[in-house]
Image (cartoon, rainbow, N blue to C red):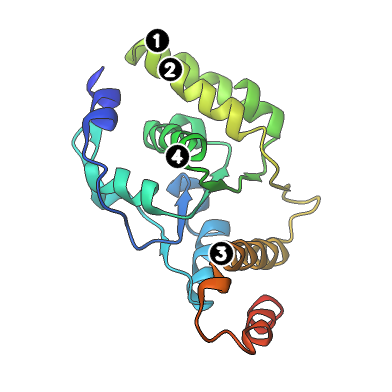
Amino acid sequence: MADLTEASSSASLSGSSNFEVFLNFRGEDTRNNFTGFLHKALKNRGINVFFDSEKLWTGEAIGPALLRAIEGSKISIPIFSKGYASSKWCLLELSKILHCHKSNGQMVLPIFFDVEPSHVRNQTGSFEGPFRKHKKNFKPDVIESWREALREVGNLKGWVLKEGVNGDQAELVELVVKRVLNDLISTTHLAECKYNIGIDSHVNELLFY
């Protein structure tokens, strides 16, 4: 099914989205719990979040609008869950996220939701079975691009949330929101502001609200 990768490479990537954060997740696993809570918390702090990509899929390929949404976002947050690897859309998005991370330094903050980071990196555990199925339906170069994305993004520093052990979702949501705010502020060129007197107090208020 070469059209999946060809659509990604040939789609127009001109322009940018207005999103500050792109959430990459499997809806069936986390939409109604952690990812839903994180999305709401980010929006409540005034952060423009891309939450659901279903409307931007076109048939069997990622549409140009989705590619622009990923490319135009300042931060991507992949939320790895037990069913993540069974979704070709999650993997296609992650491959594009890695491309943006490498090509323009897009920040990537992975979250491991009740999965081991080593399972993500090595496609073992709950990630192993889905890849056996994917190998029957997709070309080797597509599979390898997904494995590379999981290896590299799974190796980045992030957060591990294990339900029943350290499963305080509310606490993790707050930690992620603070990190996102801090990173967004640090990437804003405050020195270019013509009148920046007193702006530090507003920055601190945002960070420690």
Q: For the point 47% across and 55% down, which residue is it?
A: 74
The reply to whether residue 124 is in sight is no
Q: Which mark is residue 184?
A: 3
Mark 1 secondary-structure assignment = helix
Mark nearest the camera among 4 and 2 is: 4
Dot placed on the residue nearer the N-terminal end, 4 or 3:
4
Q: Are marks 1 and 4 in contact (CB under 8 Å)?
A: no
Mark 2: amino acid: Ile
Q: Are marks 1 and 2 in contact (CB under 8 Å)?
A: yes
Q: Which residue is mark 2?
A: 143
Picture coordinates of residue 158, whole percent (x, y): 69, 46
Q: Is residue 125 above or below residue 46?
A: above
Image-based side of 187 in relation to 49, left or right: right
What is the spatial separation of the Cα atoms under label 1 and label 4, in whole angstroms? 22 Å
What is the spatial separation of the Cα atoms under label 4 and label 2, in whole angstroms? 19 Å
Q: Which mark is residue 100?
A: 4
What is the spatial separation of the Cα atoms under label 3 and label 2, in whole angstroms? 33 Å
Dot placed on the residue nearer the N-terminal end, 1 or 4:
4
Q: For the point 67% across and 75% down, which residue is it?
A: 207
Tell me where residue 82 sits by quadrant: top right
Q: Which mark is residue 140?
A: 1
Q: Are marks 3 and 1 in contact (CB under 8 Å)?
A: no
Picture coordinates of residue 20, whole percent (x, y): 45, 61
The reply to whether residue 127 is in sight is yes
What is the spatial separation of the Cα atoms under label 4 and label 3, in whole angstroms? 17 Å
Mark nearest the camera among 3 and 2 is: 3
Q: Are marks 3 and 2 in contact (CB under 8 Å)?
A: no
